[in-house]
Amino acid sequence: MSALDRLPALATTGVGSLPFERACDAACHVLGAYELPFCPQLPHLDGDMIAEWLGADPGRCGWAPDRDRERPAAWNELVARLTVDPPAPGLVKLQVTGPVTLAMALERSTGQRGHSQRVVSLAADVAVWLAANAAGQVRRLAQVGLDALVVVDEPGLALAGLRRADAPLWDPLRAAAPAWGMHVCGPVPWDLVDVLELDLLSLDVTTHGVPPQGRPALARMLRRKGRVAWGIVDPVRPGPSANAAGLAVAALSALAGDHLPLERVADLSLLTPSCGTGRLSPERERIVAASLDAAANATRGAIAAASRSGSLRLALGQPQSLE
């Protein structure tokens, strides 16, 4: 059984970054506010998603393995708490800045376009280094009886000009953990994502919806028991939880059909914010987490009611359009 099979339907999790200034506060929050806990990246302590991995001098020309890094600032605190109070699914999400994102940043820092086969070559080397770092965290979690889901953060993947043939560059990260996924908060290059055969794809529904051209790839992912993490809460403007639940229902409905019943789509779905909250405030992060939890409960209730009445619209009103 896949480690992801232990997750409940519509499990909630965060995207990665949190705004806390103390590691103990961040670790306590992810264990209490989300059903799938994750190792938080703390911009106040780690730097942004580029600096966290490349250090304070990303403009230094080129890349070499000596650009090593310590574990995230919250790592030791999180592991200590997980050891005492492990999550029910026995699973923890680790998020790493993607090799293509880091390669693009390095190329652009030297005045290049960050859009060429040079990026692919550089990203392949960076991926090996990232995988070695991630594998160390995966092993540590295994020592305390927990599986890991490694999610690779590639926000601008559609801008990198990659082809389907470039998919093997992520193979080291695929091999680093029992399950792997990708977070793409920008437009999704569906042809490339389709061939990657991810265990999980995390995407921003609040901005991009579920475009028709992406639905076949998402349906194929679910049919082979992959997962989709729907970003249904905008951290900057969280809005009423009913709005987020409406987005969730619309996203699930977009993939439901004869071969994928609505309940099955929900079983294979997670709910998240559309992006991290690291640049906001702890109060806003708590609002986002609470809104997400309420939306998950409302969506579960709507699906249960729909299975009895045969009408999802009666259960939760008119689902929002994702066109």
Image: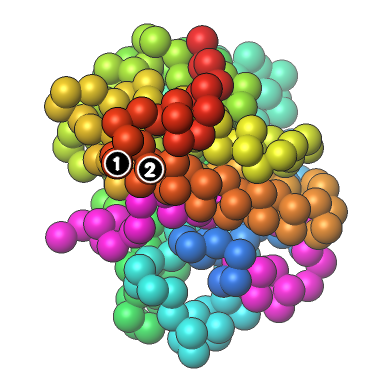
The part of the image, by quadrant, that contains residue 275 is top right
Q: Position of residue 207 (x, y in %)?
A: 62, 22
- Check contact, mark 2 vs mark 1: CB within 8 A: yes
Q: Could you tell me if residue 312 is visible in this image?
A: yes
Q: Which residue is more in the foreground, 262 or 210?
A: 262
Q: Position of residue 71 (x, y in %)?
A: 58, 68
At 67% from the left and 23% from the top, the residue drawn is 108
At 43% from the left and 48% from the top, the residue drawn is 300
- Residue 62 against residue 298 in the figure, above or below: above
The part of the image, by quadrant, that contains residue 112 is top right
Task: Please name the residue that numbered disc 2 is placed on.
Answer: 305
Mark 2: which amino acid? Ala
The N terminus lies in which quarter of the figure?
bottom left
Mark 1: which amino acid? Arg
Q: Which residue is more in the foreground, 268 or 291?
A: 291
Real-space Cα distance between discs 2 and 1?
5 Å
Structural crowding at the residue carrying mark 2, measured as other residues with C-alpha within 10 Å and reported as few (<14), some (14–19) or many (≥20): some
Q: Secondary structure at mark 2?
A: helix
At 51% from the left and 24% from the top, the residue drawn is 319
Query: How many marks overall?
Result: 2
The part of the image, by quadrant, that contains residue 286 is bottom right
* Residue 174 as seen in the image, left or right of residue 93: left
Magenta stretch bounds: 1-30
The image's colour scheme reads: rainbow
* Residue 224 as seen in the image, left or right of residue 320: left
Structural crowding at the residue carrying mark 1, measured as other residues with C-alpha within 10 Å and reported as few (<14), some (14–19) or many (≥20): few
Q: Secondary structure at mark 1?
A: helix
* Residue 187 as seen in the image, left or right of residue 129: right
Residue 76 shown in magenta: no
Q: Which mark is residue 308?
A: 1
At 36% from the left and 51% from the top, the residue drawn is 9
Q: Position of residue 105 (x, y in %)?
A: 64, 31
